[in-house]
Amino acid sequence: MIDLPDALADQLPRDVVFTVASQLNPDINTTATIREIEPQADRTTRTRRARLSLAETPVAFRLGTAISVTLSSTITARMRLPINALQEVDGKRQIWIVDPQSQTVNPRAVNITSRDNDSFVLADGVKAGEKVVSAGVNSLKPGQKVKVDEESPR
Protein backbone atom coordinates (compact mmCIF):
# COMPACT_ATOMS: atom_id res chain seq x y z
CA MET A 1 0.00 0.00 0.00
CA ILE A 2 1.09 3.54 -0.75
CA ASP A 3 -0.47 6.97 -0.32
CA LEU A 4 -0.70 9.10 -3.46
CA PRO A 5 -1.32 12.85 -3.68
CA ASP A 6 -4.95 13.30 -4.70
CA ALA A 7 -4.07 15.23 -7.88
CA LEU A 8 -1.64 12.50 -8.99
CA ALA A 9 -4.13 9.71 -8.26
CA ASP A 10 -6.55 11.32 -10.73
CA GLN A 11 -3.92 11.33 -13.48
CA LEU A 12 -2.66 7.76 -13.27
CA PRO A 13 -3.77 5.40 -16.01
CA ARG A 14 -4.69 1.92 -14.78
CA ASP A 15 -1.67 0.35 -16.53
CA VAL A 16 0.89 2.66 -14.88
CA VAL A 17 4.02 0.86 -13.65
CA PHE A 18 5.89 1.53 -10.41
CA THR A 19 9.34 0.32 -9.36
CA VAL A 20 9.35 -1.11 -5.85
CA ALA A 21 12.78 -1.47 -4.18
CA SER A 22 14.05 -2.50 -0.77
CA GLN A 23 15.36 0.52 1.16
CA LEU A 24 18.13 -1.61 2.68
CA ASN A 25 19.25 -2.98 -0.68
CA PRO A 26 17.86 -1.13 -3.74
CA ASP A 27 19.22 -3.92 -5.98
CA ILE A 28 16.34 -6.03 -4.66
CA ASN A 29 13.41 -4.67 -6.62
CA THR A 30 10.41 -5.52 -8.74
CA THR A 31 7.63 -3.71 -10.58
CA ALA A 32 4.05 -3.17 -9.52
CA THR A 33 0.75 -2.01 -10.98
CA ILE A 34 -2.25 -0.42 -9.32
CA ARG A 35 -4.87 -2.85 -8.05
CA GLU A 36 -7.12 -0.28 -6.38
CA ILE A 37 -7.20 3.42 -5.48
CA GLU A 38 -9.53 4.59 -2.75
CA PRO A 39 -12.13 6.99 -4.17
CA GLN A 40 -11.92 9.56 -1.36
CA ALA A 41 -8.85 11.53 -0.29
CA ASP A 42 -7.90 11.75 3.37
CA ARG A 43 -9.06 15.21 4.50
CA THR A 44 -5.91 15.90 6.50
CA THR A 45 -3.20 14.69 4.13
CA ARG A 46 -5.13 15.05 0.84
CA THR A 47 -3.77 11.67 -0.22
CA ARG A 48 -5.51 8.56 -1.47
CA ARG A 49 -4.49 5.06 -0.45
CA ALA A 50 -3.49 2.81 -3.35
CA ARG A 51 -3.00 -0.93 -3.29
CA LEU A 52 -0.38 -2.31 -5.65
CA SER A 53 0.10 -5.75 -7.15
CA LEU A 54 3.73 -6.84 -7.38
CA ALA A 55 4.87 -8.48 -10.63
CA GLU A 56 7.15 -10.76 -8.58
CA THR A 57 7.67 -10.95 -4.84
CA PRO A 58 11.37 -11.08 -3.96
CA VAL A 59 12.23 -13.31 -0.99
CA ALA A 60 13.59 -10.25 0.86
CA PHE A 61 10.15 -8.58 0.72
CA ARG A 62 8.63 -9.78 3.97
CA LEU A 63 5.77 -8.20 5.85
CA GLY A 64 7.03 -4.91 7.29
CA THR A 65 9.96 -4.53 4.87
CA ALA A 66 10.80 -0.86 4.26
CA ILE A 67 10.44 -0.13 0.54
CA SER A 68 10.73 2.80 -1.85
CA VAL A 69 8.18 3.18 -4.62
CA THR A 70 8.88 5.27 -7.72
CA LEU A 71 6.82 5.95 -10.79
CA SER A 72 8.52 4.26 -13.73
CA SER A 73 5.93 5.08 -16.40
CA THR A 74 5.38 8.46 -17.97
CA ILE A 75 1.98 10.00 -17.44
CA THR A 76 0.10 12.64 -19.34
CA ALA A 77 -0.68 15.75 -17.34
CA ARG A 78 -4.38 16.34 -16.95
CA MET A 79 -6.19 19.59 -16.44
CA ARG A 80 -8.31 20.58 -13.43
CA LEU A 81 -11.07 23.09 -14.25
CA PRO A 82 -13.72 24.86 -12.17
CA ILE A 83 -16.98 22.93 -11.95
CA ASN A 84 -18.79 25.92 -13.56
CA ALA A 85 -17.04 25.11 -16.86
CA LEU A 86 -18.71 21.68 -17.09
CA GLN A 87 -22.09 21.30 -18.74
CA GLU A 88 -24.18 18.15 -19.07
CA VAL A 89 -26.54 17.92 -22.03
CA ASP A 90 -28.60 14.78 -22.65
CA GLY A 91 -26.35 12.83 -20.27
CA LYS A 92 -23.16 13.88 -22.07
CA ARG A 93 -20.49 16.11 -20.60
CA GLN A 94 -19.13 19.07 -22.51
CA ILE A 95 -17.15 22.25 -22.12
CA TRP A 96 -17.11 25.36 -24.27
CA ILE A 97 -13.95 26.29 -26.20
CA VAL A 98 -13.24 29.81 -27.43
CA ASP A 99 -11.96 30.17 -31.01
CA PRO A 100 -9.48 33.08 -30.74
CA GLN A 101 -9.70 33.92 -34.46
CA SER A 102 -13.46 34.37 -34.70
CA GLN A 103 -14.06 35.04 -30.98
CA THR A 104 -16.86 32.50 -30.97
CA VAL A 105 -17.55 29.50 -28.76
CA ASN A 106 -18.39 25.91 -29.54
CA PRO A 107 -19.12 22.94 -27.29
CA ARG A 108 -16.71 20.02 -27.08
CA ALA A 109 -17.47 16.60 -25.59
CA VAL A 110 -15.07 15.61 -22.82
CA ASN A 111 -14.30 12.71 -20.53
CA ILE A 112 -13.55 13.41 -16.90
CA THR A 113 -11.61 11.33 -14.41
CA SER A 114 -12.94 12.87 -11.21
CA ARG A 115 -15.11 15.63 -9.89
CA ASP A 116 -15.93 17.29 -6.59
CA ASN A 117 -18.06 20.26 -5.54
CA ASP A 118 -15.58 22.84 -6.85
CA SER A 119 -13.73 21.31 -9.80
CA PHE A 120 -13.25 18.39 -12.17
CA VAL A 121 -10.28 16.76 -13.89
CA LEU A 122 -10.32 16.24 -17.65
CA ALA A 123 -9.10 12.93 -19.05
CA ASP A 124 -8.86 14.50 -22.51
CA GLY A 125 -10.47 17.08 -24.77
CA VAL A 126 -8.37 20.23 -24.36
CA LYS A 127 -5.05 21.11 -25.95
CA ALA A 128 -2.45 23.34 -24.34
CA GLY A 129 -3.26 27.01 -24.93
CA GLU A 130 -6.97 26.57 -25.65
CA LYS A 131 -9.34 28.83 -23.75
CA VAL A 132 -12.20 27.22 -21.84
CA VAL A 133 -15.30 29.18 -20.81
CA SER A 134 -15.72 29.00 -17.05
CA ALA A 135 -18.83 31.14 -16.48
CA GLY A 136 -22.26 31.32 -18.09
CA VAL A 137 -22.00 28.03 -20.00
CA ASN A 138 -25.74 27.35 -19.69
CA SER A 139 -26.60 30.41 -21.76
CA LEU A 140 -24.17 29.80 -24.66
CA LYS A 141 -25.10 28.76 -28.19
CA PRO A 142 -22.74 27.17 -30.76
CA GLY A 143 -20.99 29.86 -32.82
CA GLN A 144 -21.96 32.64 -30.41
CA LYS A 145 -19.62 35.65 -30.35
CA VAL A 146 -17.96 36.29 -27.00
CA LYS A 147 -15.68 38.89 -25.53
CA VAL A 148 -12.50 37.38 -24.11
CA ASP A 149 -10.85 38.96 -21.08
CA GLU A 150 -7.21 38.92 -22.22
CA GLU A 151 -6.03 40.16 -18.82
CA SER A 152 -7.18 37.01 -17.07
CA PRO A 153 -4.68 34.10 -17.13
CA ARG A 154 -7.40 31.45 -16.91
Image (cartoon, grey):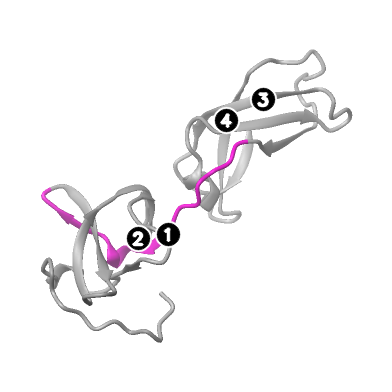
- Which amino acid type corresponds to the residue marked 4 in the rendered image? Arg
Name the residue at 82% across, 22% down. 28
Range of the magenta residues? Answer: 73-90
The label number, if any, that marks residue 31 in the structure image: 3
Name the residue at 30% across, 71% down. 134
- Which amino acid type corresponds to the residue marked 2 in the rendered image? Asn
Q: Look at the image and tell me in which quarter the N terminus lies.
A: top right
- Tell me the residue that label 4 is attached to: 51
Whether residue 22 is in magenta: the answer is no
Instruction: Answer with mark 1 or mark 4, whichever residue precedes in sequence.
Output: 4
| Nearer mark to the viewer, of 3 and 2 | 3
The label number, if any, that marks residue 117 in the structure image: 2
Front residue of 84/76: it is 76
Q: Position of residue 7 (x, y in %)?
A: 52, 52
Q: CA distance from mark 3 to mark 1?
A: 29 Å
75 sits left or right of 134 in the view: right
Name the residue at 13% across, 74% down. 144
Whether residue 76 is in magenta: the answer is yes
Instruction: Answer with mark 3 or mark 2, whichever residue precedes in sequence.
Output: 3
Provide the secondary structure element on which disc 4 rests. strand
| Nearer mark to the viewer, of 1 and 4 | 1
Provide the secondary structure element on which disc 3 rests. strand
Q: Position of residue 64 (x, y in %)?
A: 77, 26
- Which amino acid type corresponds to the residue marked 1 in the rendered image? Arg
- Tell me the residue that label 1 is attached to: 80
Q: Residues within 10 Å of mark 4 (few under 14, many from 20)?
A: some
Q: Quadrant of residue 135?
A: bottom left
